[in-house]
Amino acid sequence: MKKSIYIKILEFGEQCGIDGASYDSLIEWLESEEVINDKENVELVVKNRITSIFYECFEKTTGSEHNTRLLKPEYFYRLIEFRELEESRKASSDANRKSNIAILVSVVAIVATLIISFIQLNSSISIQRSQLESIIKSNSPPLVQKVTVENSQIAEIKTAINESAKSVSDQIKSTEVNVVKSLNKSIQPNAKASAD
C-alpha cells in the first residue's frame, strides 16, 4: 500500500528528530523518496499543499539561527497511532485468513468422515471361519465356571430372601396372635362386670 504524502512528511519529521528540518530539506527528501518528481516541476497546487502541511506539522524551534522546525508532538503521536492502526489491520487480516483455513480444514474433515461412514455402511461384512473358531476357543471353561458361580450366588440370595420373608411373616403372625390375646383379655373383665 502506497503511503500518502501526509504520512511521508510525518516520517520525515520523525527521522530529523530534535535536530529539526527546513522546508528545502523536506522537498529534497520527498524527491529522493520519489514522492514528488522535481522541485521545479512540482505543480503550484501540490507545492502549496506541501508548504501548508509542513508549517502545520512542524513548529519553529526557539533559539535556532537556521530556519529549522521540529515535528510537533501531537503529529508524532498521530504517526504512532497510524502505525498501530496499520499493525492491527495486518493482524486482523492474518487472523481472518487463519480462521478461514481452520474452517476449510474442519469442513474437509466432516466431508471425509461422511464419505468413510457411507463406504463402511455399504460394504459387506465377512467373518472368516478362522475368526469364528478363535471366538469359540476364547470361551474357555473358566468363563463357564464364573457363570455358574454367579448362578449359585443368585440361588443363595433367593434362598436368603425367602427365609427372610418367612421370618417376617412368622413375626407378623405372632404379633397378631399377641394383639388378639391382649384384646380378649381386656374385653373379658368388662363382660364379667356388666353381667353382675
Image (cartoon, rainbow, N blue to C red):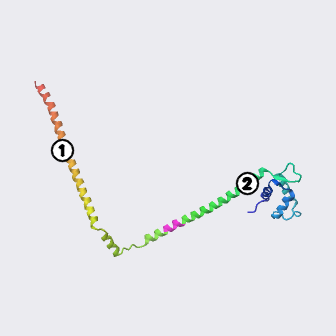
Residue at 17% over, 37% down:
178
Q: In the rendered structure, which disc, 2 or 1, sits on the residue that comes first in sequence? A: 2
Residue 112 covered by magenta stretch: yes
Quarter of the image that includes the N terminus: bottom right
Left or right for 9, reference 131: right
Query: For residue 80, which numbered disc appears in the image?
Result: 2
Element marked by disc 2: helix
Q: Give neighbour class at mark 2: few <14, some 14-19, many 20+ (Cα, 10 Å).
A: some
Q: Which residues are magenta?
A: 108-114
- Quadrant in the picture for the C terminus: top left
Could you classify mark 1 by the number of other residues whose Cα lies within 10 Å: few (under 14), some (14-19), or many (20 or more)? few
Q: Quadrant of residue 188?
A: top left
30 above or below 81? Answer: below
Location of residue 22 in the rendering, given as x and y in whole percent from the top left corner: 86, 56
In the displayed structure, does residue 129 sit left or right of residue 9?
left
Q: Which residue is mark 1?
A: 170
**177 or 3: nearer the eye?**
3
